Amino acid sequence: MLNFIKKNKIFIGTFLVFSIITITLFYQALKPAKTLPIYNPADVNPELVDSTVQYIAREHKIADFSFTNQNGKTITQKDYEGKIYVADFFFTTCGSICPIMTTNMVDVQKAFINNPKVMILSHTVTPEIDSVPVLKQYAIKKGVIDSKWNLVTGDKKDIYSMARKSYLAVKLGKPNELYDMVHTENFVLVDAERRVRGFYDGTKKEEIKRLIEDINWLCENDKK
């Protein structure tokens, strides 16, 4: 056997390399291509969606908006036009999941620091507390890069409307307080066409890894 291997080592080596390449090519051909769903209100837990849009089953897009960021600048959908971005909802005085979420969002910021196509948009759910100076102080403390990440405040009704009607991500608070929202751990991925492409638990590292992978996929396939 050893003599046979020695005499035919070139042939055996070539055959092994060819076999590995062939198996790899077959695997790649048979492996399902990665895709990301396009979410509409009808696809999401009704608790997270305003009743006025729950019936929508196609062509849902993020609505126009106008908020004020940590620098006192008005931020609208124009600032995110053609961008892939991650949206979430937080408040600066939150002592439970917010610090974890912010730390994980910083990881997302780092992953795309040199990619101008990717941005972040964080909405406070307590605008009566989170004024522009408060947001600015929070941004500095957490390492927010202004060109990449906007922390925004505004009218509570408008923030509520975006959360429930556009991002499909936030539950209601007390039934008798229409605009009292319960905070959510959801990070929402939005593509360059303003469509919701994914939801991620912002408190879990494995979910952040998945989010980063999906953003990279969108960057390469943003027309799909």
Image (spheres, rainbow, N blue to C red):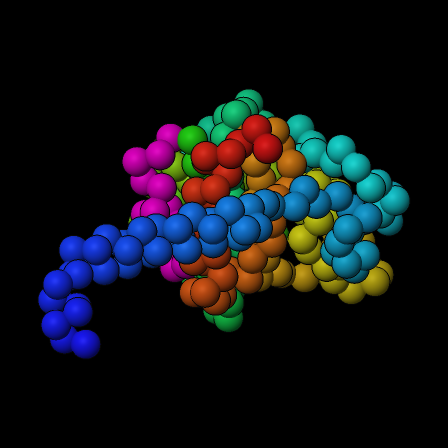
Instruction: Find the residue positioned furthest to the bottom.
Output: 1
Residue at x 11%, y 66% (from the top left corner): 6
Count of marks placed on residues:
0
Location of the C terminus (image quadrant):
top right
Tell me, yes or no, if residue 182 can be seen here: yes
Q: Is 104 a magenta residue? A: yes
Residue 54 % position (x, y): 84, 47
The overriding secondary structure of the stretch rendered in magenta is helix
Tell me, yes or no, if residue 126 can be seen here: no
Residue at x 70%, y 45% (from the top left corner): 39
Please give left or right for residue 173 compared with residue 141 in the image: right
Residue 213 % position (x, y): 44, 50
Residue at x 54%, y 51% (from the top left corner): 30
Q: Quadrant of residue 48?
A: bottom right
Residue 134 % position (x, y): 44, 48
Q: Quadrant of residue 35?
A: top right
Q: Is 188 a magenta residue? A: no
Q: Which residues are magenta?
A: 102-116
Tell me: residue 98, above or below residue 51.
Answer: below
Residue at x 19%, y 76% (from the top left corner): 1
Residue 64 % position (x, y): 66, 28
Tell me: residue 1, above or below residue 161.
Answer: below
Please give left or right for residue 139 compared with residue 16 in the image: right
Front residue (pair 224, 92) = 224
